[in-house]
Image (cartoon, rainbow, N blue to C red):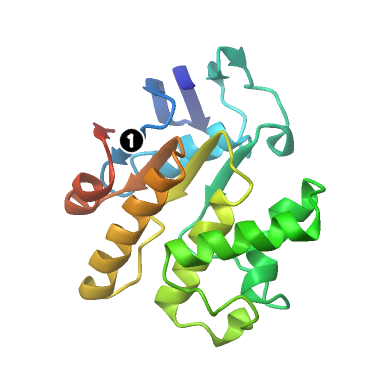
Amino acid sequence: MLAVRDLVVRFGDRTVLDRVSLEVATGEVVALLGPSGVGKSTLLRVIAGLLTPDAGAVLLDDHDITTLPSHRRNIGLVFQDEQLFPHLSVGQNIGFGLRMQGLDRTHIAQRVAELLHLVGLDTFADVPVTKLSGGEAKRVALVRSVAPRPAVLLLDEPLSGLDRELHDRLAGDLARLLRASATTTLLVTHDHDEAAGIADRIITL
């Protein structure tokens, strides 16, 4: 599904990624593990199309997408901060990508309800996102990212900033969500336990 070939990224005189290669199979959840500053988030930004590499290639289903604009890649990205739309309700946030795809209201409502049920937020469709707790906001951001059924989902430490009990509970929710949706996923984390609990395979950078 996703392949990175000999990727090189330099910022000035500093080489952040030096001939990095990896593959993620269809439906596989892979964790990218490593300390801060090693280039994990940079790699996600290249795959998402937010950063152009100095060398190497990104392939999706054997098609070279290295120079393809980010909005044409069908790749979802969730940052550490949820980046929810504050003026929209929970349901409107989750359905945003579906509306951009031109789907009808009935289909969108069904998909939103299905995803809210998966993360235990069945009654939250009309709740303003400004009223959500930290854990609830994380879950909404995650289901919003899988709603349009992206070819690949990139998660940049999506469970950071939570206390351990809530973190562990949401890690279980995330693992179930990714498998229920059969979403090909690359998860960036520095937490080995989180990686082991969510991913099918771990790559150390």
Q: Residue at x 24, y 46 (%)?
A: 195
Q: The residue under label 1 is which amino acid type?
A: Val
In front of the other: 101 or 3: 101
Q: Residue at x 26, y 36 (%)?
A: 200
| Quadrant of the rendering where the C terminus is positioned | top left
Q: Residue at x 29, y 59 (%)?
A: 171
Residue 181 position in % (x across, y down): 46, 45
To which quarter of the image does residue 93 belong? bottom right
In front of the other: 166 or 32: 166
To which quarter of the image does residue 135 belong? bottom left
Please, what secondary structure does the residue beneath circle 1 have?
Answer: strand
* Count of residue discs: 1
Residue 98 position in % (x across, y down): 72, 52
In the displayed structure, would residue 195 be above or below residue 25? below
Left or right: 175, with 78 as reference point? left
Q: Residue at x 50, y 29 (%)?
A: 10
Q: Which residue is mark 1?
A: 30
